[in-house]
């Protein structure tokens, strides 16, 4: 099933909002980290300045030997850990080895001495995030004290450095809390935006669409125009207006089409009736010429319809055989009157001529491509074939004979026996039934014979009706 307009819109909206939230959180996180790092670096620099100032003050006050107390105090400051002072070779050679706190030359410190610039290393992914900073003390002639004179060095010489570590846990926690708050706010806004969109879609799209479909059916089936003013937005109002115009157009055309169709159906029925009547009349003409009992054609037609129904043929096939059956003896039109109307038994020669009527009838009808006349051709050709193959003109056997041919063969004989002919009296009905029983599987299709015998009264009713 295809997703609805609402589902598609919401899916796109959610994807977009989630992406937007992730981007905002990433930008905020990165930016806040940069700010935190900058603050920590500034702090480290400020602290380095304080330590430098403190040591200079000790030196100037002549209490350099008491500076460990000062350094220990600095070490115990909040957020500050592992404060170390590293003295340069120049200072060591000038004043001798320093305190324990002053001997921590490592790779990072060595780089600071070489470059004369601070280095900061941040580890904010571990459980205890921290930053290590090493800030150089650089000799300068500026300021109240001239370092160059005291230490006997040139401008820019790195006299020492301060190494310290700062705890970043607080900053990281604040960053995470901020991201959590922003994420939470984003979720709240996403929910609000989605619910607002759901409401908007339902109110302005889905509702009007459903209304349009419902009213559209009314407009079409009940000829009630859609009320355009009931839609709040212009687009739906336009659609309703167009639909009304369209519906009026269709309805007008439809009534015209209905009238024409009705007329066509009447004409078609008339043509079909005329066609059937013509075929039937041709059968009746033949019937009159051969002096058959009155209504033979009518009765054969009715028996065929009844037996075809009992045999389970389709409605179309029943109609075909009913229409085509009157032409079964049409070939007799070519048989000379002397033979056709002979009131007594035919000689063998005469009978041979008489038998030609099946082939003649077939040749009269076989050129037609219409189902009715093609069926009539088959019936004319096969209605004297026998189930056991002893019939004429081709000696077809069993199922080789078309079911139309087998039906007409049976009911034609049934009617011939049950009615008076120029050459014979009519047989009593029980004798007719016995004959059919005895010829079942010989002259007649056994299944069809059984059907006729099982429903004998219905066939007799037709016989009695058309006398
Ligand atoms: Fe015949
Ligand atoms: Fe007949």
Image: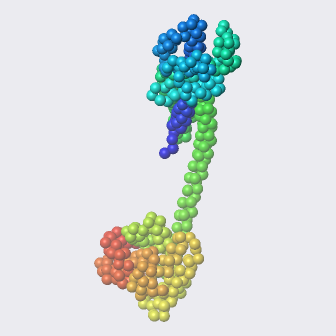
- In the image, residue 50 sits, relative to residue 221, either above or below, namely above
What percent of the width, then of the height, locates residue 101?
Answer: 50, 19
Does residue 350 appear left or right of residue 271 in this picture? left
At 49% from the left edge and 16% from the top edge, which residue is drawn? 75
Does residue 292 appear left or right of residue 269 in this picture? left
What percent of the width, then of the height, locates residue 392?
Answer: 46, 86
- In the image, residue 6 sits, relative to residue 380, either above or below, namely above
Which of the 4 image quarters holds residue 62?
top right
The residue nearer to you, when weighing 142 against 296, is 142
The residue nearer to you, when weighing 138 against 242, is 138
- In the image, residue 249 sits, relative to residue 270, either above or below, namely above
The residue nearer to you, when weighing 372 against 293, is 372
What percent of the width, then of the height, locates residue 308?
Answer: 41, 70
At 64% from the left edge and 27% from the top edge, which residue is drawn? 114
The mark total stands at 0
Does residue 420 appear left or right of residue 187 in this picture? left
The residue nearer to you, when weighing 148 against 244, is 148
Q: Residue furthest top?
A: 61
- In the image, residue 108 sits, relative to residue 68, either above or below, namely below
What percent of the width, then of the height, locates residue 417?
Answer: 37, 80
Q: Which colouring convention does the figure follow?
A: rainbow
Residue 304, can we see it?
A: yes
Residue 203, can we see it?
A: no
At 61% from the left edge and 32% from the top edge, which residue is drawn? 235
Which of the 4 image quarters holds residue 22?
top right
Viewport quadrant of the C terminus = bottom left
At 59% from the left edge and 34% from the top edge, which residue is drawn? 240
């Amino acid at each position: 099933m295809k997703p609805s307009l609402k589902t598609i819109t919401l899916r796109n909206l959610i994807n977009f909002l989630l992406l937007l939230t992730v981007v905002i959180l990433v930008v905020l996180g990165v930016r806040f980290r940069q700010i935190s790092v900058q603050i920590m670096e500034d702090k480290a620099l400020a602290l380095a300045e304080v330590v430098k100032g403190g040591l200079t003050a000790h030196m100037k006050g002549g209490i350099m030997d008491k500076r460990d107390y000062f350094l220990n105090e600095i070490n115990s400051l909040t957020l500050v850990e592992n404060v170390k002072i590293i003295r340069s070779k120049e200072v060591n050679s000038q004043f001798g080895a320093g305190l324990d706190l002053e001997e921590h030359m490592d790779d990072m410190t060595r780089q600071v001495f070489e470059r004369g610039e601070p280095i900061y290393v941040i580890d904010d992914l571990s459980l205890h995030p921290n930053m290590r900073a090493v800030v150089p003390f650089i000799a300068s002639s500026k300021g109240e004290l001239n370092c160059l004179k005291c230490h006997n060095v040139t401008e820019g010489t790195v006299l020492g450095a301060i190494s310290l570590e700062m705890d970043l846990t607080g900053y990281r926690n604040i960053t995470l809390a901020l991201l959590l708050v922003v994420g939470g706010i984003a979720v709240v806004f996403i929910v609000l935006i989605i619910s607002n969109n759901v409401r908007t879609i339902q109110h302005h799209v889905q509702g009007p669409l459903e209304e349009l479909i419902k009213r559209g059916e009314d407009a079409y089936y009940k000829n009630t125009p859609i009320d355009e003013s009931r839609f709040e937005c212009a687009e739906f109002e336009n659609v309703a207006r167009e639909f009304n115009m369209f519906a009026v157009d269709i309805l007008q055309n439809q009534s015209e089409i209905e009238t024409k169709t009705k007329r066509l159906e009447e004409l078609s029925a008339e043509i079909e009736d005329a066609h059937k009547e013509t075929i039937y009349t041709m059968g009746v003409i033949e019937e009159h010429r051969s002096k058959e009992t009155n209504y033979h054609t009518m009765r054969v037609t009715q028996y065929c319809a009844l037996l075809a129904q009992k045999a389970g043929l389709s409605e179309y096939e029943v109609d075909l055989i009913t229409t085509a059956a009157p032409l079964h003896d049409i070939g007799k039109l070519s048989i000379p009157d002397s033979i056709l109307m002979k009131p007594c038994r035919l000689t063998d020669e005469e009978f041979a001529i008489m038998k030609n009527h099946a082939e003649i009838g077939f040749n009269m009808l076989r050129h037609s491509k219409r189902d009715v006349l093609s069926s009539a051709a088959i019936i004319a050709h096969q209605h004297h074939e026998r189930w056991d193959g002893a019939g004429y003109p081709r000696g077809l056997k069993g199922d080789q004979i078309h079911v139309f041919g087998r039906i007409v063969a049976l009911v034609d004989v049934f009617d011939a026996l049950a009615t008076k002919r120029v050459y014979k009296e009519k047989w009593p009905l029980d004798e007719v039934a016995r004959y059919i029983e005895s010829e079942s599987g010989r002259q007649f299709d056994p299944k069809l014979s059984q059907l006729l015998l099982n429903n004998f009264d219905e066939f007799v009713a037709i016989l009695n009706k058309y006398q």
